[in-house]
Image (cartoon, rainbow, N blue to C red):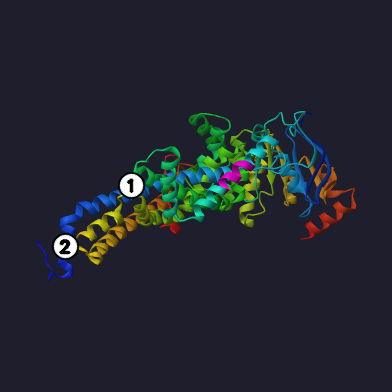
Amino acid sequence: MSVDASSSFIQWVIFILQQYWPVFLRGAEYTLLISITGTIIGFCIGLLIGIIRTIPVDNRTGLFKRVSMKIVNIILLCYIEIFRGTPMMVQAMVIFYGVALIYGIHLPILLAGIVIVSINTGAYMAEIVRGGILSIDRGQFEAAHSIGMTHFQTMQSVVIPQAIRNILPATSNEFVINIKDSSVLMVIGVTELFFQSKSVAGIYYKFFEVFLITSIIYLIMTFTVTRILRYLETKLDGPAVYTIHGSQTVPEASFRIVDREKL
Amino acid sequence: MENIIEIRHLQKSFGKNEVLKDINFSVSKGEVVCIIGSSGSGKSTLLRCLNLLEYPTSGEILYRGQNILEHNMSNAVYRAKMGMVFQQFNLFNNLSVLDNCMVGQIKVLKKDTREARNTAMQYLELVGMTQFINARPSQISGGQKQRVAIARALSMEPEALLFDEPTSALDPELVGEVLKVMKNLAQSGLTMLVVTHEMGFARDVANRVVFMDSGVIVEDDVPEVIFNNPKNERTRTFLKRILED
């Protein structure tokens, strides 16, 4: 298909798609790669910080532990405040050119992109996780402590699984934001979807046509991701149906109870 | 008889509010002690101090003659020996009934899965909940939850079991099933400390009844004396008020 000045809008869109779909695809790949890896790493950073910041400290704790906890907490708080309080676009510039200046190395661009999205997400997730942990009833902690579990055992077996379920909607938010906001990484030359779209648009000066395609691609990506996470939520809620085993007279009898609230 | 727990001069304050004042008492093996008293008298705090969910401001808690408030004894090890049953059940919401009874054995006692499962099943059988091993806490009734909570505490094979108003959050019709389980446990020789408002249970099952008021133990005697012939005026007033209802 060929186009000229008299071609209609639709013809241009089709033409651009036919000619440049591999470019869009590569851009979308980068966007997904960066946002998925960034969100997962950021989630882990957030979990770790959330667990550390909720370690109980009282007047029985040894002096050394208390002081070191205080220092660690201050450092973590600085991290959270700095990375929540500055635009990711600025962080990208500072980190990318800062590393080049101080260490004299050029980070591979894709790696730089992933690092920036990860630590940025980590700062947000740290607070989300803390909120998630605080939302868990005190009784859950007490019950775990009363059978002799340590803070980390309590977190691992009881609190974090419940907290993760509670923070999934907020995590899904972060994920969507990352898919969209990774576009700011084009300032350091990451060839994600926005960067690629700009290059394509520049060829024929067809900005509207190209970015309409781009926005649809973004929409497909975010919609798919939210659906997947929604599915994960229901999965984590556990089965709505459970089986009763045996009875007083017939041990091998079993029947299923349906939890209507969950269907 | 051998003392499992001995409390000496235990004192607990929340800020300026002194909740427990110079508490002294002991529990020997196989004894069932009921702690009664009005709300705010400090009975729950006393029980929570025994499991270190609240840390005493001063005083000593001797477990088999050893002061657990000194740093040489791990809190976790001690806590595993003092099972606790809560008013609000506090079953782990993310785990099935069976896993609730297994997780502590695996994580704290380092048992392998099969052993933990056998122990858990044995105690779930005792409280009559083996049919529901796959259910989540949200899928069973309050009375069933409390029975599972008891099985969870028993699965740790503790030296003593502490009950913090185990039936207060239950619908009246569900209280019976939990009290029945507790009665069976008492008869099997388990050492139990029960904070309760169930005077019938205290009268029938306890070896000793402790009456607390404003942070002190007012009277500590066998149930016959406490209920029929209390020596202290405050005990008399309290029981009169309770039993009239």
Sequence-first disc among 1 and 2:
2
B118 or A111, which is in the foreground? A111
Q: Amino acid at mark 1?
A: Leu
Q: Is residue A64 left or right of residue A45?
A: right
Q: Position of residue A132 (x, y in %)?
A: 53, 52
Q: Secondary structure at mark 1?
A: helix
Q: Residue A14: which numbered mark, if any?
A: 2
Residue sticking out furthest to the left: A1
Q: CA distance from mark 1 to mark 2?
A: 27 Å
Give the extent of the magenta segment.
A70-77
Reply yes or no: does residue A193 show up in magenta. Answer: no
Among the 4 quarters of the image, the one containing residue B4:
top right
Q: Secondary structure at mark 2?
A: helix
Locate residue B63, reporting x and y percent: 74, 31
At horizontal 68% and vertical 44% (from top left) the residue drawn is B163
Q: Is residue B96 visible?
A: no
Residue that carries the numbered disc 1 in the rendered image: A33
Asked if residue A76 is among those painted magenta in the image, a careful observer would answer yes
Which residue is more in the foreground, A226 or B243? A226
Please tell me how crowded label 2 is: few (under 14), some (14-19), or many (20+) other residues with Cα within 10 Å: some
Disc 2 residue type (three-letter): Ile
